Image: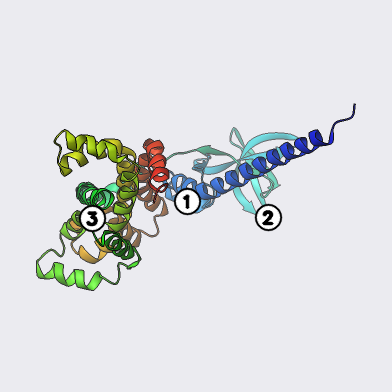
């Protein structure tokens, strides 16, 4: 049977498309594995004891070497190859030439001299959940967590309130120079935080806000260019006819925002809230500058100081880091669908 040339061409295109999809999937999978490796290492180290970390730093699985009692002493247990049989024997003494003296724990009188490198240590899974409790009680992480939650959620409320008002004005009102004013607002995104740090610090010092949580909360009540941009883009996708219908029913501008715009903008509002949560939760720079007293520190500053004090206790540092990383990960997975929808729609109309 002769296959027409156009059928062979179509078959070739399908094979190429399948190949491209397979290669793309493999590349994305490999990238995902590479990205997740630090997280796996952090969680594995957080569940190890200090001795386990010293024994195998790169192995993420918390395994411990099994020891047995031999003549009143704890000796490490190995799987040794003895006359073609694999038996468990204890290493009682190192011998010259890379060898060791092995004995059967049930019959310690019979000693075998075998190469150490060819024997396999007997290991078992040994998870240390107590690392989390120890890490979180050495320093007052409960106080740091409370400060971080206050800064994050109070600031989030102020940010959503102010950014919604500003975005509504830019998306619905018309006035001379409004677009130019919006461009000026967007240009502030390019202004580094370091440029405004000294003026802000002087102002907050004059009004007595230094070493309080106010410098981290109050500025968020005056909108943010990035959040305003995302909300404005979403508001512009909502038809003006709905505003006009509400206006005919007697609703004023604020009522149209609350009862017409915001109920249809849940995806955008959740997206902006997630962005703010990630920013405030992980922010280290501004809390380090404005907060001096230990009882006012946030989680980011407290974790950095904890790392400096207990640098030799890698397992405790990883346990505290895992607690720090867990809320953003859970938040993203819980709201992933709404978050992706908000990002796509917010950037689809200019």
Q: How is the image coloured?
A: rainbow
* For discs 1 and 3, the disc positioned in front in the rendered view: 3
Residue at screen point 49% across, 43% down: 62
Q: Split into 4 quadrants, where in the image is the N terminus?
A: top right
Mark 3 highlights which residue?
223
> Quick one: label 1, few (<14), some, or many (20+) residues within 10 Å?
many
Q: Where is residue 341 drawn, in percent x and y?
A: 40, 39
In the rendering, which numbered label is found on residue 208? none
- Mark 3 and mark 1 in contact (Cβ < 8 Å)? no
* For discs 3 and 2, the disc positioned in front in the rendered view: 3
> Quick one: label 2, few (<14), some, or many (20+) residues within 10 Å?
few
CA distance separating discs 3 and 2: 69 Å
Residue nearest the viewer, comparing 117 with 73: 117
Q: State the SS at label 1.
A: helix
Reading the chain from its start, which is encountered first: label 2 or label 1? 1
Q: State the SS at label 3.
A: loop
Residue nearest the viewer, comparing 248 with 7: 248
Mark 2 highlights which residue?
98
Mark 1 highlights which residue?
53
């Amino acid at each position: 049977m002769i296959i027409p040339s156009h059928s062979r061409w179509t078959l070739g295109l399908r094979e190429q498309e399948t190949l491209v999809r397979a290669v793309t999937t493999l590349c994305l999978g490999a990238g995902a594995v590479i990205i997740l490796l630090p997280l796996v290492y952090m969680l594995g180290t957080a569940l190890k004891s200090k001795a386990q970390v010293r024994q195998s730093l790169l192995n993420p699985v918390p395994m411990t070497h099994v020891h047995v009692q031999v003549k009143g002493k704890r000796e490490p247990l190995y799987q040794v190859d003895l006359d073609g049989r694999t038996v468990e024997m204890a290493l009682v003494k190192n011998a010259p030439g890379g060898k060791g003296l092995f004995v059967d724990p049930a019959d310690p009188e019979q000693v075998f001299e075998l190469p150490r490198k060819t024997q396999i240590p007997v290991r078992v899974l040994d998870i240390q959940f107590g690392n989390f409790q120890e890490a979180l009680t050495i320093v007052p992480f409960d106080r740091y967590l409370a400060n971080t939650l206050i800064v994050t959620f109070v600031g989030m409320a102020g940010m959503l309130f102010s950014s919604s008002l500003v975005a509504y004005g830019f998306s619905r009102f018309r006035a001379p120079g409004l677009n130019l004013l919006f461009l000026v607002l967007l240009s502030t995104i390019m202004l580094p935080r370091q440029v405004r740090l000294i003026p802000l610090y002087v102002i907050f010092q004059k009004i007595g806000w230094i070493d309080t949580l106010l410098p981290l909360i109050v500025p968020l009540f005056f909108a943010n260019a990035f959040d305003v941009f995302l909300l404005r883009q979403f508001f512009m996708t909502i038809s003006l006819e709905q505003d006009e219908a509400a206006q005919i029913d007697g609703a004023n501008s604020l009522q149209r925002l609350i009862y017409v715009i915001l109920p249809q903008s849940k995806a955008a509002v959740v997206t902006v809230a997630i962005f703010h949560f990630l920013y405030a939760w992980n922010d280290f720079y501004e809390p380090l500058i404005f907060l001096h007293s230990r009882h006012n520190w946030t989680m980011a500053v407290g974790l950095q100081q904890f790392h400096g004090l207990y640098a030799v206790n890698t397992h405790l540092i990883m346990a505290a880091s895992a607690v720090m990383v867990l809320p953003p990960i859970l938040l993203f997975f819980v709201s992933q669908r709404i978050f992706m929808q908000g990002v796509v729609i917010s950037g689809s109309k200019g």
